[in-house]
Image (tube, rainbow, N blue to C red):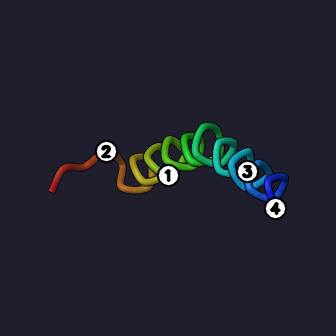
Amino acid sequence: MESLQQTIEWINSVLSDYVLTVLLIGCGVFFSIRTRFEVS
């Protein structure tokens, strides 16, 4: 049971540290370019 918890904690740390950061920055750049940096 402890190994399962360690595995879940490792997956959580990888997702929150790397994947989520890259996705947020990527989405921000994509939508900025898509809307041609216009402010409504």
The residue labelled by disc 2 is 37
Q: What kind of residue is marked 2?
A: Phe
x 80%, y 52%: residue: 7
Mark 1 or 2, nearer chain start: 1
At label 1, counting other C-alpha atoms closer than 10 Å, the crowd grade (few under 14, some 14-19, many 20 or more) is few
- Mark 3 near mark 4, Cβ–Cβ under 8 Å? no
Q: Which mark is residue 2?
A: none
Mark 4 or 2, nearer chain start: 4
At label 2, counting other C-alpha atoms closer than 10 Å, the crowd grade (few under 14, some 14-19, many 20 or more) is few
x 69%, y 42%: residue: 14
Mark 3 or 1, nearer chain start: 3
The residue labelled by disc 4 is 1
Residue 36 x %, y %: 36, 49
The residue labelled by disc 3 is 11
Q: How many marks?
A: 4
The residue labelled by disc 1 is 27
Mark 3 or 4, nearer chain start: 4
Q: SS at mark 3?
A: helix
Q: SS at mark 1?
A: helix
